[in-house]
Amino acid sequence: MGGIRLKAPRNLKIDFCPSPKQYELWKLLQPECPRCGGEIQQKLIGYDANLNPQYKPYCSKCGNHNVPQLILGGGAAGGGKSYLASVWLVSSCIRFPDLRAVVARKTLKSLKESTWNTIRMIIKKWGLVEDQHYHINNVAGTLRFWNGSVILMLDLADQPSDPNFERFGSMEVTICAVDEVSEISQKAIEVLFSRLRWKTHETFKVSKMLLTTNPTTNWIRERFVQDRNGDKVTTREGEFYVPFSVFDNPDIAFRQTYEAALNKISDQATKERLLYGNWDFIEANDMAIYRLFDGNKHLVTGLKEKVYDPSKPLITVWDFNVVPHMSTLLAQIDYDNKKVYILEEILGKAEDKENNTPGLARKIQKKLYREKHIGGVDVTGDPAGLQRSTTSEDGVNNFTIITDTFGKGILRPKIKLLKKQPPQTTRCEFINELFSGFGNWEIQIDIRCRKLTEDLLYQLKNEDGSKNKSKVTDSRTGVKYEKYGHLSDCLDYLLCYYLRDMWNKFKNGGDSSSTLHTTVAHYDGFNY
């Protein structure tokens, strides 16, 4: 520290009056039990295969086993989440000598411009004097207190040269706060959490990490808030979520000013996300190929419950890529009222051994039987699924496997396909026109179709107007796959086939000649 000798302050005044919501989060961050204030201890619960003892934290007073370790403070902007995180780090460093705390964000630049400034403001507000009670090393990115405790700045951006975050390998810290965690990968958080091991027993008894973010659509939402169906998540043991809105900020003057500013946001989805902490928001993406998709207009909460009719034909639309999953959409069409209903997306996942045609077909068949579907089933999708694989017999392909699995009983499956894949550029323009009400048609999508929604929001386009299907690498398997486009391809096939008169006129400039290849005759039920 360049010869600087720090000393303890004589008149330390910690000024922090949390709101009820901040206090709820505050209790989860303390070393004591959040239920009763009792002491946390470790209990021997058994031995592993190598006879190593296994321990589990619990409250010695009330017996609570669900001890907070990974805590999310999420929701609206301006709720006081980041301020509370800063207070927690500073007060913990004052409370425990030789503590090592980390404050992190995606980049050091964004961290220095936000949370780091808040930490410095709090320290000065509490009467601490730089180079008397604490010292800042801007080169190392550290803030050291008189008692040996230190706060370290850390960036958590993914780096191609360090995919496994080995740069955290020798790190030993006690607690951590990550701001704007929506910008951070789940792997970065999990690797960093594994490094919370410095003097844990002498201080917090268990590893403690605080995450803060505004509503987002990535892994944070599915892990802490709501699953892919929009249902509330039951968090894992030791993991907690505390929702915030701007109205939870205890600073009344700030709250009034900031609320007025947020109320001026013209985009309702953005306002819902930032002002009220709505996790069902849909972002706009001007670079997306489906530029006329509007979540506020086309996504409907509880659509399936409102419109699904088991006595009418159901369309199953298939995409046969197996990584990261096999994809299907279930839809019904009301030709009289010109409405297309996307009722559900069903994914065949590798971990369930359903990312194959027989496995996913069995899953859907059982589902339709449970729902007592009697209106018949269409099987459509990627025409490439007609191709025979080298492992199957002549006349056997993805579509015949599906119909054979569905059986010849009550489902009465019919294969209905385009001759070939419709050209991407033209069909995407056609879909955009339908989203804008072309031909007075209306597309409604159940809000639980999360992967389809991601495709519509984030699928970018190439310069020629086709889909930019760039690949990413699965961090667990090393397999490369197309991140977006599988469910939107299903939507393309559905609309180009079942609104084929309009599609052909759009494609051919008025020529309505058919380009369809129908392997099985139509059946009654659709008003073609």
Image (cartoon, helix red, strand yellow):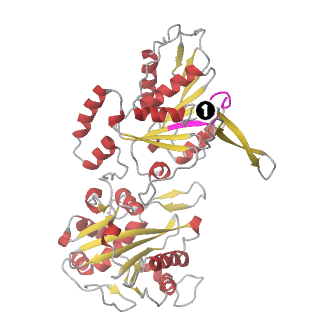
Residue ranking furthest to the bottom: 521
Is residue 63 within the magenta segment?
Answer: no
Residue carrying label 1: 38
**Is residue 123 left or right of 291 when viewed as pictured?**
right
300 or 327, nearer to the observer: 300
- Answer above or below: position of 406 versus 139: below
Residue 287: x and y in percent read: 32, 54
313 or 436, nearer to the observer: 313
- Please name the residue shown 31% across and 63% down the image: 465
Magenta stretch, residue numbers: 198-210
**Is residue 521 left or right of 99 when viewed as pictured?**
left
Quarter of the image holding residue 66? top right
383 or 495, nearer to the observer: 495
- Please name the residue shown 31% across and 84% down the image: 515
Residue 321: x and y in percent read: 49, 70
Residue 329: x and y in percent read: 40, 71
- Please name the residue shown 37% across and 49% down the image: 279
Quarter of the image holding residue 15? top left
331 or 393, nearer to the observer: 331
Magenta span dominant secondary structure: loop
Residue 309: x and y in percent read: 33, 77
Residue 341 seen in render: yes
Which amino acid is tagged 1?
Gly
